[in-house]
Amino acid sequence: MKWRNKGHEFDFHIDYYKKTKVIYFYGCVYNKAFIDLLTWAIKKVNNGSLDVDFIFVDRDIEKQNKPFCGYPVISPELFIEQFINKNDIVITFVSDNSLRALLSQLLGLSIFERRLNLFTEYEFFRYATVFIWSRYNKLYLHMVDVFISSHCNVNCRDCCIQVPRGQKRMTSFENLTKNIDALLSFADYVGFLLYGMGDGLIYHSLDKVFDYTGLSYGDRVYKQRVVTNGTILPNEAVLSALHRNNVNVVVDDYRENIPLAREKFPKVIETLSRKCIDYEILLREYWEDFQFGSYDNSHLDTTQLTAFMSECISGCRGFPFWGYDPSKVFSCLFQTVSNHLKLVDETEDDFIDWSRITKAEFIEFVLGYTNKGYLSACTKCSGIFEGRTARRIPVAIQENADERIKTE
């Protein structure tokens, strides 16, 4: 999206959200993590009070007769009746197969507008920043990816961050804490503070990082999070820090294509369970291939590239990438990777300096506004779009396995 009125692009949203009284969840699929995070964020910025109601919507009459996970359930007909002339919000919680039909039905009623009062789960996860800024004048970021290292001990052929192609680098503990301090001097609250870009458990001072953030900002960060490939068993110091700070560990299950994962994964999971560490297993049937670096959008003009970025629903964008380059904050993983590996010529529109921009402008940039309307990385990326099947590739196929970093 192209900046037209910098710092005021969401003025209409701000006026709308100030009057919001109900958030509807369409579909009785209880996403506990989503609702818990949203509840935490609202209470943090509103003196411990939840000043908006949650209501589920479902066509199943049996579900309408009793609360769902503690919240009332109403029919779609009553939902439409209550929604008219209100400033409320609806978030869809339905299967991918049902989503297109539901969105088409709701948009046909002319009372709904995407990214204003009608959101997919993906969209509102990011627009919660606008919602909270509008109502409470606090900068809440649902997730921030803070750079710690680009090292990884496996060598996936189709790695989306392409670490095998770049120079391995690891930030110092002192530099990392400065970046975290800068982040929390700018933002009021952070949902998930994710440590990226390579395998998180490789970092040399991980226990000190968890303790530093937990002690300094534990009341302002919902969860610290680290992602690992299931081949690395944390040492006792890291395990203690994970437990002590209630860090969320996302463990990729790559056993099908990584022999080392078949050997180590069961022990990693058993250890995390035994130590009562918050973890989740991520098993993917496929990776979505963005073909970044090799794809060619050079035939698209400025208007088309602006639409390309605006319509892209990749989960790799819509939140800040912090600390990857001094004073630069990025809004898309692939622009961040490009900066790291120099895959696309960078312009001043591809990043912001948080110290030279207002919080309103920061929100706009993170959600896709730039002076030219798109990022330079868009010219070398296939993107992900609603209603279109992305190119799918096998997960974690290895190449040059002998070159991997040895990590125990």
Image (cartoon, rainbow, N blue to C red):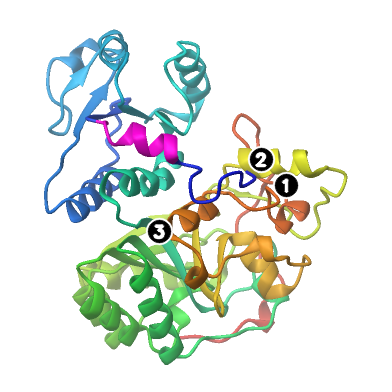
Query: What is the count of numbered marks?
Result: 3
Q: Which residue is mark 3?
A: 143
Q: Kindly identify the amino acid type of the residue bearing the numbered disc 2.
A: Ala
Q: Nearer the viewer, mark 2 or mark 3?
A: 3
Contact (CB < 8 A) between labels 2 and 3?
no
Position of residue 116 relative to residue 334, above or below, is: above
Q: Which residues are magenta?
A: 11-20
Q: Kindly identify the amino acid type of the residue bearing the numbered disc 3.
A: Met
Which of the two discs, 1 and 2, labels the residue nearer the N terminus? 1
Query: In the drawing, what numbered circle is on residue 382?
Result: 1
Q: Which one is in front, 366 or 171?
A: 366
Position of residue 129 relative to residue 350, above or below, is: above
Q: Residue at x 12, y 33 (%)?
A: 70
Q: Which one is in front, 341 or 238?
A: 341
Q: Residue 14: where, in percent of width, then height?
A: 37, 39
Which of the two discs, 1 and 3, labels the residue nearer the N terminus? 3
Contact (CB < 8 A) between labels 1 and 2?
yes
User: Which quadrant of the view contains residue 90?
Assistant: top left
Q: Which residue is mark 2?
A: 390
